Amino acid sequence: MKALFIVYNQAYNQEIVDLLEGLGQRGYTVWSEIGGRGSVDGEPHLGSHAWPTQNHALLSVMEDSTASKVMKKLREVDESTPALGLRAYALPVEDVL
C-alpha cells in the first residue's frame, strides 16, 4: 500500500479529484486554501495581496499498482502546465485500520 501526498495549485482541484476517481480511487482527504512555496522554482502561493494564489493538498491511501498509475498521470498533468505547481510523494503504508 502507498499513501500519496499531493500538493497542487488550487486551479487543479477538480482535475486531481477526477483523475483519482477515473482510476477507481474513491477515498481521499483534502486540505484547501493552504499556503506554501516550492523548493525548486515557481512563485509562492500564500493567499496574500502580493501572492494571491493558494494550494490544496490531498492524501489518499491505495494499492501500489493504483499509486503507480496515479503518479504517471500526475506527471503528465504537471508537464503540461508546469507553471501552476504540483508535487506528489508516494509513501509506504505499513498498516491500515
Image (spheres, rainbow, N blue to C red):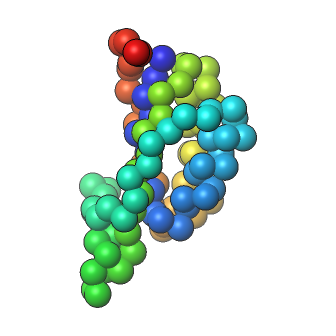
Give percent across and percent down for residue 11: 53, 67
Query: How many numbered discs?
Result: 0
For the point 55% across and 34% down, the residue is 27
1 up-or-down from 91: above or below: above
- The picture quadrant where one finds residue 3 is top left
Find residue 41 and report its image quarter.
Answer: bottom left
> Which residue is farthest bottom?
49
Q: Residue 25's spot in the image, x, y percent? A: 62, 33
Q: Measuring 69% from the left and 35% from the top, which residue is drawn there? A: 23
**Image vertical order of residue 83 relative to residue 17, above or below:** below
Q: Is residue 26 above or below residue 52?
A: above
Quadrant for the C terminus in the image: top left
Q: Residue at x 65, y 45 (%)?
A: 19
Whether residue 79 is visible: no
11 up-or-down from 77: above or below: below
Residue occupying the far right of the picture? 22
- Do we see residue 18 in this rendering? yes
Which residue of the protein is positioned furthest toward the front in this rendering? 97
User: Camera-side residue: 89 or 60?
Assistant: 60
Q: Residue at x 56, y 45 (%)?
A: 75
Depth check: 80 or 10 in front? Answer: 10
Q: Position of residue 32 (x, y in %)?
A: 40, 59
